[in-house]
């Protein structure tokens, strides 16, 4: 049986067996067998392919790892759990940003704490974008229904919308950079996600509690794990519902 998931992922990215083989340094016939005969690549190739296709290994090759082993790998993706956002070392956010070489993704409602308390945050984002790093920043729509609901749940009313607008004021200097996308979303924010290549900080949310007082997971992607990739998929689904903050640019 052919691996239709792998075939579809390659088509979406405009990759042929020959071009994928060239990227991986293998024979094109090997890639053909992965696609047409559903052969499982070696783990090092599975990781690279999943990264190229922006898919999880468990989705592309669901039988490559036994269920128990896949669960163990996913657990190992958890680097640390912080009981609240304030317990995250203040320099960790900047360290992860400075290490990023491919992509940075932020999914929040406001996320005002980052540019407000770290004067290096926005300048570093600019430097990263100018060096070719793809930066995607998703903020809650100040006029969206879910922002109003969150403000009511936390008892702060319109303050949530004001936080978003205050946060965006810090990012105006990035608006004309080709590698930067700054968007609004109007979705229920189950988690705030801060992605830096293959590492991620996930600020979980508790009903009626400000995000600053909710736990944070520090994750690092591992081949064969699906915890990290699950949050990537969530981020991408929200990205698919976005609209530009400054559409004229």
Image: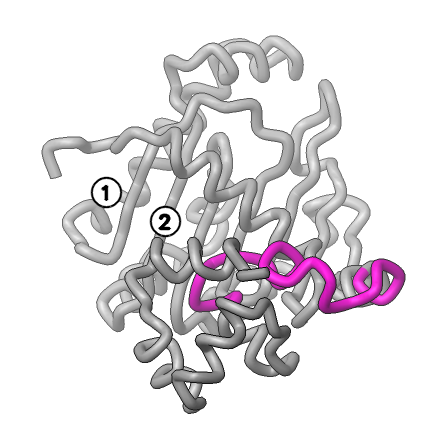
Extreme residue toward the left, this view: 248
Residue 39 rendering spot, x and y as whole percentages: 61, 73
Extreme residue toward the right, this view: 68
Rendered-image quadrant of the C terminus: top left
Which of the colour schemes (rainbow, by chain, secondary structure, one colour) is used?
one colour
The answer, for residue 143, to whether it is visible in the render is yes
Q: CA distance from mark 1 to mark 2?
A: 14 Å
Residue 232 rendering spot, x and y as whole percentages: 55, 50
* Direction from residue 222 to residue 31 in the image, left or right: left
Where is 150 relative to 104, above or below?
above
Where is 56 relative to 17, above or below?
above
Quadrant of residue 9 within the rendered picture: bottom left
* Direction from residue 237 to residue 143 in the image, left or right: left
Q: Give neighbour class at mark 2: few <14, some 14-19, many 20+ (Cα, 10 Å).
A: some
* Direction from residue 154 to residue 234 in the image, left or right: left
Residue 79 rendering spot, x and y as whole percentages: 75, 65
Which residue range is magenta in the image? 50-70
* Direction from residue 167 to residue 221 in the image, left or right: right
Inspect the magenta stretch and tell me whether residue 61 lies in it.
Answer: yes
Q: Give neighbour class at mark 1: few <14, some 14-19, many 20+ (Cα, 10 Å).
A: few
Quadrant of residue 123 within the rendered picture: bottom left
Which residue, given by chain and number where applicable, does mark 1 sit on? 172
Which residue, given by chain and number where applicable, does mark 2 sit on? 136
Taking depth in this image into account, of 224 and 96 the one nearest to the observer is 224
Taking depth in this image into account, of 236 and 162 the one nearest to the observer is 236
Q: Image point 64% across, 31% down: which residue?
A: 190
Q: Image point 41% across, 33% down: which residue?
A: 139
Q: Nearer the viewer, mark 1 or mark 2?
A: 2
Where is 176 relative to 204, above or below?
below
For the residue labelled by badge 1, is the local secondary structure a helix, a strand or a loop? helix
Q: Point out the tag, 1 or 2, that comes first from the N-terminus.
A: 2
Q: Image point 42% across, 89% down: which residue?
A: 27
């Amino acid at each position: 049986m052919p691996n239709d998931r792998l075939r579809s992922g390659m088509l979406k990215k405009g990759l042929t067996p020959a071009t994928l083989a060239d990227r991986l340094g293998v024979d094109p016939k090997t890639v053909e067998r992965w696609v047409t005969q559903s052969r499982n690549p070696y783990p090092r190739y599975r990781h690279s392919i999943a990264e190229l296709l922006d898919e999880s290994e468990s989705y592309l090759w669901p039988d490559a790892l036994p269920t128990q082993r896949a669960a163990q790998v996913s657990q190992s993706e958890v680097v640390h759990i912080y009981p609240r956002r304030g317990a995250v070392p203040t320099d960790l956010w900047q360290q992860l940003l400075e290490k990023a070489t491919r992509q940075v993704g932020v999914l929040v409602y406001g996320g005002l704490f980052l540019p407000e308390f770290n004067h290096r945050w926005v300048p570093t984002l600019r430097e990263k974008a100018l060096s070719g790093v793809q930066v995607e920043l998703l903020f809650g729509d100040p006029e969206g229904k879910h922002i109003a609901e969150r403000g009511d749940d936390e008892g702060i009313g319109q303050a949530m919308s004001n936080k978003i607008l205050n946060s965006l004021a810090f990012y105006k200097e990035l608006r004309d950079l080709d590698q930067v996308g700054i968007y609004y979303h109007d979705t229920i924010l189950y988690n705030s996600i801060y992605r830096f290549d293959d590492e991620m900080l996930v600020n979980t949310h508790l009903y009626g509690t400000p995000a600053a007082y909710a736990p944070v997971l520090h994750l690092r992607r591992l081949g064969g794990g699906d915890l990290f990739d699950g949050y990537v998929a969530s981020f991408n689904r929200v990205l698919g519902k976005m609209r530009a903050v400054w559409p004229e640019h």
